[in-house]
Structures are given as C-alpha cells and as structure tokens.
Image: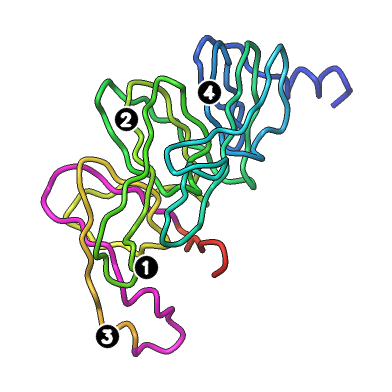
C-alpha cells in the first residue's frame, strides 16, 4: 500500500466511548477530566493531558497494589486534562468491562490497565489462603460505575463456579470469593510446578472467574 493508504488504514477509529479499542492490544482513552492507568503503559497521547503519580492509603506511588507483608506493588499514574491517551502493556490482550453502580470485580494488580475516576478501588486481602504469603492473597477491588480495562496473556476464558484454578493463571473474579484447595497429587508429578499444588477454589454457583492461558509470575519469582 502507498503512504496515504497506510495512514488511513491505521489511524485512530472515531467513536464516542470513553474507553475504545484501536485493536486487541491498544486502548484509546478519551480523557475528559481524569483517568487512572498503569504506570509505563502510555505509548502516545494528544491534547492537553498531564501525568502524576497516584498514591493511596497504603502510601506512596506504589500504593495501588502494595501489601505490607510482601512490599510488592504496581505503580499507577493519574492522567488529567482532555485529549486521547493511548495505552498498551507488553502486547497483552485488552478487555473492556463496563461496571454498573455498585458492581464489583477483583483483579490481579498486574492485569489492571486503566479505569475511570468514577470507579472506586482498594486493596482486598483474603486471609489464610494456602500456598500464599502469611498476609494472604492480595487483589485490587474495583467498584463501579465506570469503565475498566484489564489485560490477559492471550484470549481469556470465563468460567462459572464451582471451579478450581491455578492462582498464577487467575486474572479476575466477580460475585464469588475464593478459598484454597491443596492437591498433593500434583506435587508428585514430574515437570509440574509446585505452585499447582495450591489452587483457588470458587464454590457455589454465583459469579464468574477469568483465567488466561499463561502463568503470571510475581516480581522476584
């Protein structure tokens, strides 16, 4: 194709939504006020937008996913102004969810790409999950209303409880809370990760669980 055809084929799509996919791995956010995004995810922007580190009750720019017992965190930034903000995260697939008022989803902090300022967020720790740190399992609770963009390695699979999942492959859940399950038989299988001995167990029949075809490792692993 010639240059004009290349430009026309790859220019941003016109649309009125706050969160819009330009392709499966690139998010276009129409900023009009403020939006929270994963630090380092900005690849371009147009208009009048400024960026600042975002703190939380846990303290500091890494407060978004900082748990006192582990010291781990995911940095976030607040984009303020008006214009278009283009976000991506290591070629991961992007999923846009529209949360109604009071609707909640719990997401692995590394898999949160962006959310509107109308969405409330806080650290949620589930205590006494076998196989995790003494502090328990820490995720980010996002409560609507507003748009949320999460990322997955490959296409996600959405399952209904009851189901057991590998913690390292579990991206998010809503309407259900996990317990733990220990499968000793997996620990004896040659070539299998010892992490698979410990599973998240979602019981009941309500809600859903999002998994990906990839085992996500935490920093330092």
Residue 104 position within the rendered picture, expressed as x and y whole percent measured from the top left: 28, 34
The answer to whether mark 3 and mark 2 are in CB contact below 8 A is no
Q: Earlier in the sequence, mark 3 or mark 2?
A: 2
Q: CA distance from mark 3 to mark 2?
A: 38 Å
The answer to whether 6 is drawn above or below residue 214 in the figure is: above
The residue that disc 2 covers is: 143
Q: Secondary structure at mark 3?
A: loop
**Residue at the disc numbered 3:** 185
The residue that appears at 47% across and 28% down in the rendered structure is 115
Cα–Cα gap, marks 1 and 2: 26 Å
Which tag, 1 or 4, sits closer to the chain's start?
Answer: 4
Please name the residue shown 24% across and 65% down the image: 128
Q: Quadrant of the C terminus?
A: bottom right
Crowd around label 2: few <14 · some 14–19 · many ≥20 (10 Å): many
Which label is found at residue 35?
A: 4
* Residue 2 disc label: none
Q: Which mark is residue 133?
A: 1
Which residues lie in the magenta part? Answer: 188-212
Give the residue at x 71% y 12%.
Answer: 47
The residue closer to the viewer here, 88 or 141, is 141
- Is disc 4 placed on a helix, strand or loop? strand
């Amino acid at each position: 194709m010639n240059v004009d055809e290349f430009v026309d084929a790859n220019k941003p799509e016109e649309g009125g939504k706050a969160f819009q996919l330009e392709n499966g791995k690139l998010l276009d956010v129409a900023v009009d006020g403020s939006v929270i995004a994963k630090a380092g995810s900005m690849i371009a922007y147009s208009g009048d937008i400024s960026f600042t580190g975002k703190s939380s009750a846990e303290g500091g720019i890494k407060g978004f996913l900082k748990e006192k017992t582990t010291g781990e965190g995911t940095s976030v930034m607040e984009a303020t102004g008006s214009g278009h903000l283009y976000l991506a995260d290591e070629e991961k697939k992007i999923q846009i969810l529209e949360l109604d008022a009071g609707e909640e989803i719990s997401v692995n902090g590394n898999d949160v790409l962006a959310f509107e300022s109308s969405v409330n967020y806080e650290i949620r720790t589930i205590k006494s999950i076998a196989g995790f740190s003494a502090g328990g399992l820490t995720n980010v609770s996002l409560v609507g209303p507003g748009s949320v963009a999460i990322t997955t390695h490959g296409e996600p699979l959405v399952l209904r409880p009851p189901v057991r999942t590998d913690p390292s492959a579990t991206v998010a859940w809503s309407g259900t809370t996990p317990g733990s399950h220990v499968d000793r038989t997996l620990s004896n299988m040659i070539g299998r990760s010892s992490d698979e001995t410990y599973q998240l167990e979602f019981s009941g029949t309500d809600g859903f669980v999002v998994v990906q075809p990839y085992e996500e490792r935490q920093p330092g692993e």
